[in-house]
Amino acid sequence: MVNPFDTGQEVEISPAGVRRLRQGHLWVYAGDVTRDVERPDATFVRVTDAAHNILGHAFHSPLSQIRLRLFSRGSEPPGLALLRDRLKDSINRRIPLLKAGRACRLVFAEADLLPSIIVDRYGDFLVLQTLSRGSENLKTLLVDILRELIEPCGILERNDVKARRLEGLEEKCGILFGTVPDNVQIEENGISFIVDLNAGQKTGFFLDQSENRLAARGYVSGRALDMFTNTGAFALHFAARCESILAVDLARDSLEQGRRNAELNKIVNIEFREGNAFDILKELDRSGEKFGAVCLDPPAFAKNRGALPGAIGGYKEINLRAMKLLNPEGILVTSSCSYHLSEDAFLNVIREAARDAHRYIQVLERRSQAFDHPVLAAMPETHYLKCFIARVL
């Protein structure tokens, strides 16, 4: 059996790559590799500068533009003990959530110094993603360690994500250990949700918005509009505070799940409507509809830097139309999960939308992803979710 921690192969990187690592970033791009390995089959490689000084050890991805993902610094190679300690430390950081029985992210990849590894907990079950060739090679070890540390009833892999194609890896989904049901029930802020682990968004649920849903709930009232509702998480949080909610999504299966979630919680003041968000926003505006609160939680409009100009136009349009639908003093909850759109740039989009809608906005809260999705300061890529709660005058 090949030892996945064997670091006999060496990769030399450019001065720019060295600076990047020394500044705390964990990625080295293919363009900064000056001498690559001869046999691209290693899980880990030694990373050196031109003078052959060892900078650390990294996952090696021969087909990806992210060629190296730094796992450890210094001359000592990583081993099973370090992998186990990293996983244990990451889980221990979430102890408050675990004690509360919350569904949560246990491992957030680079932000927890476990590059390309994601682990989410839904009750007695774990969902694992290994998003690089290196972490894929460690999958069996990851399952063994997670079984030891968490003692789950089952572990599911949700590796059906496009990012794996860039690594030359197949997309797949399946049970790695134990048994895992198609649906599990979780509770968030006193509300119950049925989560489809096999087909739901991300690993089943948008865990990163959990704290933002709770915060936004404290501001809304009257009639509310929840665009891109998915399975109704924001809408269900708003239900106790609002007279009625119109929840809109293009995905019929997600809306059916949202209806089931509403029935589970005995909530009857939400109307789930299928449709394109841009079209429905226009229709509501043309018909003179008004709301006390509007929530916008769209998917990432900018999947890459080249898509950013078009994404900015999309974000501006939905925010402008949302503001036109709001009553004076109405609440706008607006999010972007596009990493390539910075928080300041997103706020500028909202300012421009307000100008064109002839409205003023008061920013009440600037928010980000939840506690279990921390941001590694030297890696802006880990800060992807931006959420503003604003009053529209």
Image: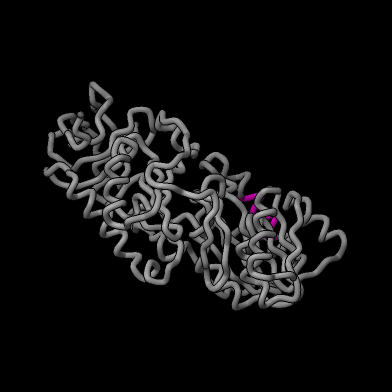
Q: Position of residue 380 (x, y in %)?
A: 40, 53
Q: Give the image location of residue 356, x and y in percent.
A: 73, 61
Query: Where in the figure is residue 383, as x and y percent of width and height?
Result: 43, 56
Q: Residue 100 in the image: x percent, y percent?
A: 41, 71
Main SS of the magenta segment?
Answer: helix
Nearer the observer, 228 or 49:
228
- Whether the magenta-drawn stretch holds residue 376 is answered as no
Q: Is residue 233 left or right of residue 273?
A: left
Q: Is residue 1 left or right of residue 159?
A: left
The number of discs equals: 0
Q: Residue furthest top?
A: 38
Quadrant of the image occupied by residue 101:
bottom left
Residue 93, can we see it?
A: yes
Color encoding of the figure = one colour
- Which of 270/45 is in front? 270
**Is residue 317 rendered magenta in the image?**
yes
At 24% from the left edge and 22% from the top edge, which residue is drawn? 39
Q: Look at 67% across and 78% down and name the residue there.
A: 241
> Which residues, given as a range, are shown in magenta?
312-319
Q: Is residue 16 visible?
A: no
Which image quarter: residue 42?
top left
Q: Residue at x 31, y 65 (%)?
A: 93
Q: The C terminus is located in which quarter?
A: bottom right
